[in-house]
Amino acid sequence: MSALTTNKSVLSWIDEKVELVKPDKIVWIDGSKEQIEELRATACSTGELVKLNQDLLPNCYLHRTAVNDVARVEGRTFICAPTKEEAGPTNNWMEPSEAYNMLYDIARDSYKGRTMYVIPYSMGPVGSPFAKIGIELTDSIYVVLNMVIMTRVGKAVLDVLGDSNDWVRGLHCRCSIDEEKRYICQFPQDNTIISVNSGYGGNVLLGKKCFALRIASYQGWKEGWQAEHMLILGIENPQGEVKYICAAFPSACGKTNLAMLIPPESYKKKGYKVWCVGDDIAWIRKGPDGRLYAINPENGFFGVAPGTNEKSNPNALATTKEGTIFTNVAHNLDNNTVWWEGLDKNPPANAVEWKGSKWNGQESEEKGAHPNSRFTAPAKNCPCLSSEFENPNGVPISAIVFGGRRAKLAPLVYQSRDWNHGVFVGSIMASETTAAAAGAVGVVRRDPMAMLPFCGYNMADYWQHWIDIGKTLDADKAPKIFNVNWFRKDDEGNFMWPGFGDNLRVLDWIIDRCEGKVGAKETEIGFIPNAEDINIEGLEGEVTLDSLKSILEVEKELWQEDAKGIEEFYAKFGDRIPPVLAEELATLKKNVQ
Ligand code: OXD
Ligand code: MN
């Protein structure tokens, strides 16, 4: 098949990689329906995909990864900057030439007998001023078909690229899925990503975490914009005005659910609507009017399946009904559909569990779906997709929200005093870990701006970049910055806030604050709502004014402890810590004494 471009930088890079991995065949992905159909058929013939019930789930497929390859591997993810300091203390680092040599040794000849797929893709609407282009080489049809959903793929992308050298190189080699030789390496200075020995989404869909966060965060630093691990949603009020919020949460804290939130009954009746622009990543830059604007660089949702159901996220469920790839969920053999824990209370009795063995839905210690099983679904299926989704200039941001999963300490919501304090609030984010990444679950870890595994350079420089962005914004144009915690528990371990759709009640307060419509109490940690200002109408029996007050309290002793944790965390960055943040920490310590 002939190349889809005459771009010399593209062709010579591909030539080099062909020489290295030695494919039998090269296929350029043009994004056409026919080509996608052909690839699906090939993948079904080899067992890489299982075609699901086409009446119930048209164009949907099931895939199982290797049992040892089910999540992102942060321990094997490297930022290969020229010096360790440039990668910073929160990233694994490898010297670039050493990394290239090692990766090339692993990749060498690994496509023998296989096909090289060349995927030209755009992160962001093709041709948007926010958009960036990448080319991923892969020997996995699963990767191709996922990239076709998650990004904009095909010839149009290469036409926009023209002769430019401004594109991100991505090489993925499945190799033998050997955990000991699994590496996900980013070379921010070279616009390059190399991923070997994995077939799991977050490690191999190179447009997503590797490019749109790790490489893009570095590009944003150099070019004056921001790549953030944030959902983007619009709240439409009864007057039809839509305000946009970007929100950062660590993996699997319900970002997809929040992004597709269904308003509580009382809000629905009044005419409130919530529109989803994105569920995972926001690229943010200043617009001509001096406000910050955000786009979602992705074109689909790579969501966690377990727990997704008609109640928790009907929009996500509806989104998966067509053209979706399910990964590591249970296969219901009776009707050739899929199932996961938390979908409903009827596990299929005649099924195959995620590892590929027969499963009767009964054995409780055996799961039908892996806890990090996923759906890859086209954004256009989403019933609440924002009409601004394709807007090449993005949406204007009123508020930035940080959040984490904390049983204690962090109140339901508080507002930072100003931009710099907001950057501090983001920098001290912490959360109890989940199954989205390999490793222990339920341990509190610092996850600044939810970017701990995704920042492509020294986190201290990243914080300084946030502060520098703030300096370019007029105070009345800068988004207001908040922190939320949906996960507070009482002493018996019960959640104290219902979450899901009811989170709109908090977002409503946030928008009111942005518009100066509501007061707040200034406390040691920032502005806390007067409990009466959070609408709990319809929550009788779940939340009372008193229980609300208790999750809005600032517990000084806990904050004193936390301040010590922050100090220890900051100490890792030595004198690279932005002075502004050191001052904010000193203020917090003084305030909670
Ligand atoms: C994700 C993650 O998959 O953050 O979005 O792990
Ligand atoms: Mn994510």
Image (cartoon, rainbow, N blue to C red):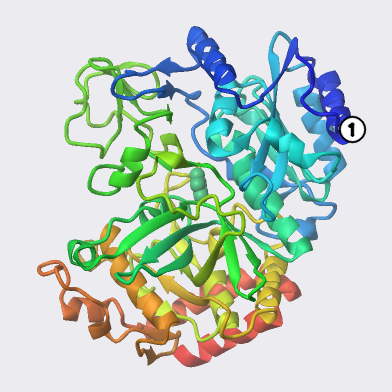
Image quarter of residue 335: top left
Between residue 425 and residue 62, name the one nearer to us: 62
Residue 586 pos. (x, y %)? 58, 87
Q: Position of residue 520 (x, y in %)?
A: 36, 89
Q: In terms of image quadrants, where is residue 77?
A: top right
| Closer-to-camera residue (181/188) | 188
Q: Is residue 443 among the parts visible in the rendering?
A: yes
Look at 80% across and 25% down and name the residue there. Answer: 105
Packing grade of label 1 (10 A; few <14, some 14-19, many >=20) is few
* Residue in the picture at 58% in, 33% down: 147
Give the residue displayed 35% in from the left and 82% down from the top: 555
- What secondary structure is marked by label 1? helix
Is 355 positioned to the left or the right of 501 in the image?
right
**Measured along the vertical axis of the image, is residue 246 above or below residue 311?**
below
User: What kind of residue is marked 1?
Assistant: Lys
The picture places residue 514, in percent across and down from the top left corner, at 44, 80
Please state if 138 lies on the left or on the right of 497 as rendered.
Answer: right
**Closest to the observer, 99 or 245:** 245
Give the number of marks: 1
Look at the image and tell me in which quarter the N terminus lies.
top right
Residue at 48% from the left image edge and 59% from the top image edge: 232
The image shows residue 257 at horizontal and vertical percentages of 36, 52
* In the displayed structure image, the side of residue 226 where residue 102 appears, left or right: right
Q: Which residue is mark 1?
A: 8
